[in-house]
Image (tube, rainbow, N blue to C red):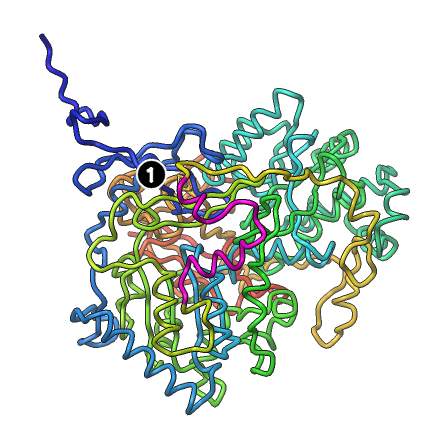
Amino acid sequence: MTQINYEKGRIPGQESGIEIRHSLCDICSPGMHCGLDVFVKDGKILKVEGTEGFPINNGKLCTKGAGNRQYVYREDRILTPLKRVGERGEGKFEPISWDEALKLISEKFLQIRRDYGADKVAFYSGYSKHYRFMLRRLASVFGSQNYGTESSSCMTSGLMAWLIASGMPMGMNMPNAELVLGWGANGFHSRYPMIRNMYKNMEHGLKVITVDPRITPASQRLASLHLRPHLGTDGALALGIAHVLIEKDWVSHEYIQKYVHGFEEYREYVKAFTPERTYELTGVPAEDIYKAAEMIHEAHGICVPESSTLGHHRNGMQNYRAIMSLLIITGNVDVKGGQVPAPHSFMERNCGFETYEEEFMEERWPKDAPKAIGADRFPLWYELRKDMQANALADNILKQDENSVRAILALGMNYRMFTEDAKYIEAIKKLDMFVDVDLFLTDTAKYADIVLPACTSLERETFMPYAGGQVWMTKKAIEPLGEAKPDTEIISLLAQYMDLDDDLLKGGYDACLKHILRDLPVTLEEMKASEKPLKLPDIKPYVFGTMNEKGWPTPTGKLELYSELIAAHPEWGLDPLPTYTEPYNPDPEKYPFRLCAGARIPNALHSRLHDVPWERSLLPEPSVEMSMEDAERLGIELGDDVEIFTNIGSLTFKAIPTATVMPGDVFIYHGYREKDINSILDGTNLDPYSGFPAYRSAYCGLRRCA
Ligand code: SF4
C-alpha cells in the first residue's frame, strides 16, 4: 500500500505536525494586505498560501506574496541591534543589547533637542506603514514637526488633488459604474483586487478606457479604448477631452450650476486644448480624443482608480486635477457609480467606519514648533499635509546651517527612492546620528550609527481594517527571528527611554489601538480571538449626494475647478486652475528620449524584493525597454548593453526591444542597486505643487555600447 508522506506533501494535521496559522502579507500597499495561510512546523515556515474567503485576496497571492517565506528568511535579516564600528556605509557593525541601543539613541536625541531644538531630529517612515500613527505621534510628543514618509513620492499627490477639488479623500463606486477611466492603472502588475472587481463588473456592462503610453495587460484585456499619451502629458489629454465635452455640450449644466465653482474660468482655459493641439502635445490622435469624450458622455457613473503613477511628473498634481475635472463637469462626483467621498478610517483607507486615528496623530502636534522641512518650497504640500516633504530633506541637511536636521530616526528608509540619491548619502554622512529600523541590512542601513531589527508581518500581530467595516488583529505565524521586535514596540520603547510625556505611547501598541478604536462595537480582544476579519454591525452604506447637498469642505462649499485656496496665496506662485505645463527637458537635442523610471513589474515592489531569489529570477538584470523601431534604427538587439545618459550621469542596461513601447520612449524598472536609475535623475526636477519627483517623465540619451 502506498504510504502518504504528510510532511513532504505539506499536509497539515497530526500526522505531519504541520499547522496552518492565519497571518498577513504586507509587502505592498495597505490597500491590499492579503490574508496568508502560513504552514508552520516546529516554529519554521514551510510555505504560504492565500487565505480562502479573505476580504482582499480570497485564496490568491500575487508573485510577490508567494515569495513571503524567502522574504522572511532572507540571509541579510538583522537579528540583533547593531552599533556601527566602521566608516559610514562600510557595513561594519557589532551587536549590542536593546538596552544599550535604546539608551544611546535616547541620550543623543534628548541632547540634540536640548542644544539645538526638537525639530533638529527628523522622523521618517518608509515601508511598512502599520505603525505610522504611532511614529507621527512620537515626533509630535518629542516636539518635532519634521515627520515625513515615503508618501512624499507615493499616492499623496492624487489625494492632494481631491483635497483641492472637494476638501476630502475620494474613492470609486465601481460596482455601479458604467465606465472606468483607467488612467495609469495596470492592475495586473499591482493592485490586483481592482482587476477582479473590474472583470466582475465588465460582465454587467462596465467599460474601461485605459490611458497608458505602453501596451499593458490592462490595455489588452480590459480596455474598450486605449489612449497612449506621451509620458507626462496626461493633463493636456484630460484638458483636450474636456474641450470636446464642452464644445459638444456634453457637460451637466444643472450639476455645474448647483455644485461646481470656477466653471467659467475653466471653460476659458480649456478652449486652447483643441483636439489638434492636444494631439501635438500628447501624440493621441484627435479621433481617439473624440471617442473618449463620447464614451464619457454616454456613460452614467464614471470613476477613476487611484494611481501613484500620475503624480510622478513635474506637472503631476495638476495632471490629476485635470483628470478629476472630467468627472466634475460631467456630474460624476458624489453620485452612484461615480467618485464618492472616502473619509479615512485607518492608514488612509476608507473602510466604512470612523476611528480616532487622525485625532491621535494631531492632538499632540507641536503648534509652536518651526514649520516642517519643505514647507517654504512646497507650501501647498505643507498646507494640505502638514508633513515634512522628504524630497527636500537632503538639501536641508547639506545646507549645514542653523535649520539643518542633525539626527534622523528612520523606519524602513530607502535612500534610493529619491532622485539624484547620492545627495541623500552625503546628507546622512553629515548627521550627528542616523538610526535605521529595518528587516534587512539594506544599503541605507549600512550608513546608520545604530540599526534596530524589526520583524515582518508574519512575526507580529497587526490591526487591519478592510472595506465594508471589517476589522481584524492578524496572527503571529512564527516568533520574531533573533531579537527582532515589532516597529510599534520599538516606538513605544523609545518613548519610554526618552521618558516622553505620553502614557499612551509608553503603554504600547494595544493601548494606542484601544484608544483610537474605542467606539467600535467589537473589542481588540474579540479581534484577537477571531481567526478571520470580523464584520462590524450597522455599517451604513453611503447615501449618494450627501456631500453635494450638504456642501463640501472647500472655501466655497462647492467642488472647485478653480481653487480658492490657491488663489488666496498668490505668493505660492501656483495656478488655481488645473493648468498644464510641459515636462522638463534640460536639452532636447542631447536628451531626445522620454524616460520612465519606475514602471511596475509584477515581481517587485520598488527594491523590496530584488534580493528574494524567486522574485529576482523573473527579471535578474537591470534592463531598459525600448521600441522595436528605435532598436532597429540604432542597431540594438535583445540583451545588448545600452548606455542611458541624462544631465546627471549615465548607466548601462540590458536592452529589451519590445512592441509594447512607443518610439521615443524608454522604460526602466528601478531599485536595482547595481544600476540605480534614480541616481541619474535630476533631483531638482520636482512638482512645485506636491514636491514629487518626475520619475516618469525625465529625458535621456541612449546609445549602444561598443
Ligand atoms: S504583495 Fe501581493 S500578496 Fe502581498 S499584500 Fe500585496 S497584493 Fe497581496
According to the picture, the residue beneath numbered tag 1 turns out to be 638
Q: Pick the residue in front: 80 or 695.
A: 80
Comparing 355 with 39, the one in front is 355
Residue drawn at x 41%, y 69% as measured from the top left: 506
Number of marks in the rendered image: 1
Image: 585 above or below 231: below
Q: Is 188 placed above or below 448 here?
A: above
Residue 276 showing in the rendered view: no
**Residue at the spot 85% in from the left edge and 57% down from the top edge:** 265
Relative to 595, is 180 on the left or the right? right
* Residue 577 in the image, given as x and y percentages of width and height: 76, 59
The amino acid type found where label 1 is placed reads Leu
Give the residues drawn in magenta, as a range: 507-529
Q: As displayed, is residue 226 above or below residue 166?
A: above
- Residue 524 location, x and y as percent? 46, 49
Q: Secondary structure at mark 1?
A: loop
Coordinates of residue 390 in the picture (x, y in percent): 49, 68
Residue visible at 21% across and 74% down?
Answer: 84
Q: Please tell me in which quarter of the rendered image ligand 1 is found.
A: top left
Residue placed most toward the observer, 694 or 252: 252
> Is residue 185 in view from this perspective?
yes
Task: Tell me, yes or no, whether the highlighted magenta stretch contains residue 251.
Answer: no
